Each structure stands twice: as C-alpha cells, then as structure tokens.
Image: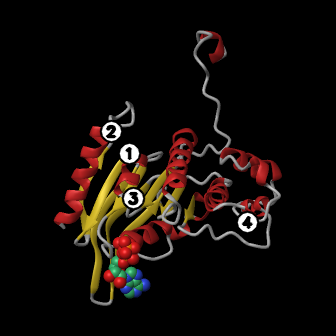
Amino acid sequence: MPITEILPRDIAVPVAHPLHSPGARVQLRHAGRSFGGNRVLADLDLEVAPGEFLSIVGKSGCGKSTLLRLIAGLDQPSSGSVLVDGVAANRAGDRLRLMFQEPRLLPWASVADNVAVGLRTGPDPEAVAEALRAVELGDKAGFWPAQLSGGQRQRAALARALVSHPGLLLLDEPLGALDALTRLTMQKLIRNMHERAGFTAVLVTHDVSEAVALSDRIIVLGRGGILSETRIARDRPHTAAELAEIEAGILDAIFAA
Ligand SMILES: Nc1ncnc2c1ncn2[C@@H]1O[C@H](COP(=O)(O)OP(=O)(O)OP(=O)(O)O)[C@@H](O)[C@H]1O
C-alpha cells in the first residue's frame, strides 16, 4: 500500500527540499597541525554526525581556521587523519563546499551564472533557479553582483555553495561583514535551510550568540585541543534566559583558556 494511504489526511508528508543532501560524516582521529615549532592543533579527536550543525569558537589564534582548512582538505594534518565520509578530506571533492566572509562572486557574471559556478556536472538552469528561490533571490537571477546588497550577495554565495547538494557545508565567518539585522536574517535562513535540506554544517565564528543560534553543538578550541563542548537540543524552543545561560557558559570556557 502506498504510504500516503495509511497517513491521516491532516499529517503533511514531508516534501524533499529542493537542495536536499544527505549529510556527510566528518571524522578527525588524533589530528595535529604544527607550523614549524608552533603546535596549533594536537591529537584532536572529533566526529561530526551526518546532518549535525557544529560551531567552533575560541580566542583569536587558537586554530579555528586551521581546523576548518583541515576539514576542507585545503591543508593536511601533520599527524593523524581527517576524513569526510570515510575519504581523506582533500579527496572529498564535490561532497563539500566552503563559504567565506566575502561572497567572492565574479563581478562580470550575472547572479545566476555565479550560482552556476557551484555546479560541477555541467549547466543546469533549473537547479540554479531552485537554489536562487531557496535563498529568496528568485527575482535577481539576471542582476550583476554590484546591484545586490551585502546580504543578498551572501545569499547568492550560499546558493552557489548548495546548488550541487554537497553533504558538507563549511562556513568561515560567513556573516562577519554584515550589519546586525541582516546577520539575524541570514542566520534564520541558514538554520532553516540546514533543518530542511539535511547537509552537515561546520561553522567558525567569533560570535558566540551566532553559534548558539545556529548549532546543535558548539566546541571551544584552545591550547591545541577541545576545551569544552556544549550540546543544544533543537527539539524544543529555548527561552531567551536559557540561551543567555548557554552563551555565558561558553564565554566562560573561552576566557578560562
Ligand atoms: N600557513 C601558516 N603558516 C604558519 N603559521 C600559521 C599558518 N596558518 C596558521 N598559522 C598559525 O596558526 C595559529 C592559528 O591560526 P588560525 O588562523 O587557525 O587561528 P584562528 O583561531 O582562526 O584565529 P582568528 O580567530 O584570529 O581568525 C596562529 O598562531 C597562526 O599564526
């Protein structure tokens, strides 16, 4: 019997999100990274589950970007291993995408053509249109990047990152250059997309409240390793006081380092 026939009429059957992607698993085993005599990460064990949203916070220079670059496969560990879906991160290819503080759009290409850069399998105008609709830029496909606001440019960058349905989205301070209000709107969009599309996300941020707003888990990095780990259950709403308490605990862990 088709599943729809046994469901009561008032229960909506979830519709696959247009950018749906099965989340990738990230595994770091005894991972270390040194630059000359400077040991930035040492013997790090970390696993990010498929579909999880993990944030990395910590004092300036503690190694957040170094860790993200290892997961992205842009840099190699000096010791140990970094795997994405069981494959060395630098060979994970299309399974992961990065988003940075600057949108890095091509100024001479339309918004749609910029999003199409994220496709590796040839032109697919329908996929581009869907990605633009998902970030609420459906009406800006023919615009030049210079004709967009800062927040809209970051949304175009998000569409470019997600158009190929990567299992893993790596975010390096993606909202750092936006004004406070646009930042909140973008946080909501990213959280919403993450919940519905299913990819795994790893965010590096200086903004602890942003990490709390977006994440299932937050790690504080320092002295070469993980100093603290906080899980935020997303199956119920949190009061402002609860979120403030979580944030205060994380800030304590950062400053105790
Ligand atoms: N390519 C490199 N060569 C030499 N040292 C490096 C290199 N990349 C990072 N480092 C060093 O590793 C340490 C951690 O840098 P990293 O950029 O990962 O810190 P971060 O936590 O992201 O800092 P911030 O919050 O200021 O962005 C720093 O001491 C930095 O100088």
Query: Pointer 4: residues within 10 angstroms few (<14), some, or many (20+)?
Result: many
Helix, strand or loop for disc 3: strand
Q: Amino acid at mark 1?
A: Asp
- Residue at screen point 28% across, 50% down: 247
Residue positioned most to the left: 256
**Amino acid under disc 2:** Ala
Q: Quadrant of residue 109?
A: bottom right
Q: Earlier in the sequence, mark 2 or mark 1?
A: 1
Alpha-carbon distance for marks 2 and 1?
17 Å
Per the image, the residue denoted by label 3 is 27
In the image, which is nearer the foreground, mark 3 or mark 1?
1
Asked whether disc 2 touches disc 4, contact meaning CB atoms under 8 Å apart, the reply is no
Q: What amino acid is at disc 4?
A: Pro
For disc 4, the marked residue is: 145
Which residue type does callout 3 highlight?
Gln
Give percent across and percent down for residue 219.
30, 57
| Residue 232, picture quadrant | top left
Q: Which mark is residue 216?
A: 1
Mark 2 — residue? 240
**Left or right, residue 221 beside residue 53:** left
Where's residue 215, x and y in %? 40, 48
Query: Disc 4 to disc 3, how far (Cα)?
Result: 36 Å
